Image (cartoon, rainbow, N blue to C red):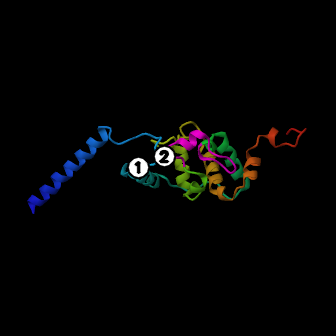
Amino acid sequence: MRNFLAFIGALSILGVIAVAAYLFAGFSDVAAGDRSRDNIFDHAIERIREASISRHADGLPPIPFDDPLIIQAGARQFVQHNCDECHGAPGVQRKAFGRAMNPGPPGLQRMSANDPAHIFWIIKNGIRMTAMPSFGRIGVSDNDIWRIVAFIKKFPTVSADQYKSWTASPAQSAPSGETR
């Protein structure tokens, strides 16, 4: 039995050395341009990301998510911080660089299914090895982030016309000849 355990231990050590050699010798392709390959490292990183977010994200929203004014303010924050350029929005396609990212930024339909605390944590802290920045680090307030979360949660029922009217500047939304 002792020899068997020693064999398993040695095999495990050799496996770790082989994986490390593979990774640190540059055999794992980190190019963002090719999305056709699906490998175990991509799955591992995704699983690690999901586990980390689940472990760190907690708390209840301090604002009501059914208040139309909060949802509209969240849509304006979403545009102000250029979130629509990577994630798209109702009636707004992602910019070319947002479509070229790998891993690609999730669309709002997918994001809206997440727990509000998870969405808040992602926006506030960002995610390493993706293009998702930390909005908390650049000074976006928790209240503004929660407003964005309220908008994202409401996204599946927001029409392109609603989004456009909520995010239009006052001069754009006023009837012709009038200003606000």
> Residue 97 colored magenta?
yes
> Residue 17 colored magenta?
no
Q: Residue at x 63, y 48 (%)?
A: 148
Estimate the x, y position of residue 53 in percent, counting from the top left: 46, 52
Q: Is residue 83 left or right of residue 38?
A: right
In the rendered image, the vertical position of residue 125 relative to residue 119, given as above or below: above
Q: Which residue occupies the foreground of this view, 95 or 64? A: 95
Q: Amino acid at mark 1?
A: Asp
Mark 2: few, some, or many residues within 10 Å (few <14, many ≥20)? some
Q: Would you name the residue on which mark 2 appears?
A: 103
Mark 1: few, some, or many residues within 10 Å (few <14, many ≥20)? few
Q: Which residue occupies the foreground of this view, 90 or 128? A: 90
Quadrant location of residue 99?
top right
Q: Which residue occupies the foreground of this view, 1 or 104? A: 104
Q: Which residues are magenta?
A: 86-105
Q: Residue at x 55, y 50 (%)?
A: 106
Q: CA distance from mark 2 to mark 1?
A: 9 Å
Q: Would you name the residue on which mark 1 appears?
A: 42
Q: Residue at x 45, y 54 (%)?
A: 50
How many circles with numbers are drawn on the protein? 2
Main secondary structure type of the part rendered in magenta: loop
Secondary structure at numbered mark 2? loop
User: Which quadrant is home to the C terminus?
Assistant: top right
Secondary structure at numbered mark 1? helix
